[in-house]
Image (cartoon, grey):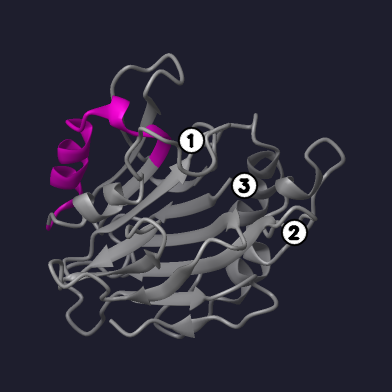
Amino acid sequence: MCTVVILRRPGHDWPLIVAANRDEMAGRPSAAPARHWPDRPEVVGGLDRLAGGTWFGLNDYGVVAGVLNRSDSLGPKFGYRSRGELPLEALDHAEASVAAEALSAIESASYRSFNAVIADGRDAYWLRSAGGREGRWAAVEVMELPVGLSMITAYDLNDERSRRTHLYLPRFSDAQPPEPTSGDWRAWQALLASRLHDADAGPEGAMTVVTDGGFGTVSSSLIAVPRATLESEAPRWLFADGRPGEVPYEQVIM
C-alpha cells in the first residue's frame, strides 16, 4: 500500500508539493529516477525493471504522475497489463488536465484496480479504477484534487478506512511544509520515515512499513513544482533509494 501526500497552493511560488512512499516486495528490481525511456526523453521516473514502467514520474513540462494499487490488488496478475504503463502515458502530455482526460479513456478492464495522481502547478486530479472485474466501478473516474493537503493510499482520497491516513493526515497538516527554495524538507522527511502505527493497523499502518515477509517501504520521493512564471526555479525531486530514515534523500538530476 503506497502513499501519496499532495499539497496544493494556487498562487504560491511552489503551488504543488508531492510526497510519496513506495511500498513493494523488497525483491522486485527497480532503478532510481532518471531518463530511462529513449522513446520518452522528456520523462524522468523510477524504473520498474520487472515490467518496464514506473510508479512515479515527472516530465519537462512540470506534470507529475503516479500510480498506486488499490486494496487487495498488490502485484502483477496473469492476463492484466502493468499499471506502471499509466504514469508514462500521462507524462506524454504537457498539461495535467489533458493527461487526466487521456487516462480516463483507457480500457480499465485491462488493468488491476488502481488509484492515480496527475498534477501540475495549475491543476491536479486523482483517478480511481476498479480494474477488470475487481469492484463496483466499471470505468476510470477522474476527480479534482482540492486545494490544501490530501492523502491517498489504497483507499479513496482522505479515506480514514486507511489507518495510515487516519494517523498521518493530521500530522502532515500540522507540520511545516517544505521550503524548496531554501532546501528545508525536514518536517516532511521525518514524517515519511515514521514507523509509528496503532494496534488496529499494525506495521502496515506506518508511513515507513517494515514487515517480516519481505514487503515494506522501498523508496521515497519529495517533489516540488514551481509556478509557471517563476523562471528562476525548476522542479525539484529528492529521492531516497531505500527506507527513508535509513537512506538519505538525494537530488534527482533533471
Looking at the image, is mark 1 or mark 2 nearer the viewer? 2
What is the quadrant of residue 188 in the picture?
bottom right
In three-dimensional space, the C-alpha distance between marks 1 and 2, rounded to whole angstroms, equals 24 Å
| Residue 106 is inside the magenta segment | yes
For image coordinates 80% across by 55% down, the residue present is: 212
| Residue 26 is inside the magenta segment | no
Residue span colored magenta: 94-115
Residue type marked 3: Leu
Left or right of residue 125: residue 130: right
* Residue that mark 2 sits on: 210
In three-dimensional space, the C-alpha distance between marks 3 and 1, rounded to whole angstroms, equals 11 Å
Left or right of residue 154: residue 215: right
* Other residues around mark 1 within 10 Å, as few (<14) / some (14–19) / many (≥20): some
* Residue that mark 1 sits on: 157
* Whether residue 75 is visible: yes
The reply to whether dot 1 and dot 2 touch (C-beta < 8 Å) is no
Residue 3 vertical position relative to residue 107 in the rendered view, above or below: below
Q: Quadrant of the N terminus?
A: top right
For image coordinates 30% across by 25% down, the residue present is: 109
Mark before the other along the chain sequence, 1 or 2 = 1
Mark before the other along the chain sequence, 3 or 1 = 1
Looking at the image, is mark 2 or mark 3 nearer the viewer? 2
Residue type marked 2: Val
Q: Quadrant of the C terminus?
A: bottom left
Q: Percent from the top left, x then y, of residue 153? A: 54, 42
* Residue that mark 3 sits on: 169
Kind of element beneath mark 2? loop
Kind of element beneath mark 1? loop
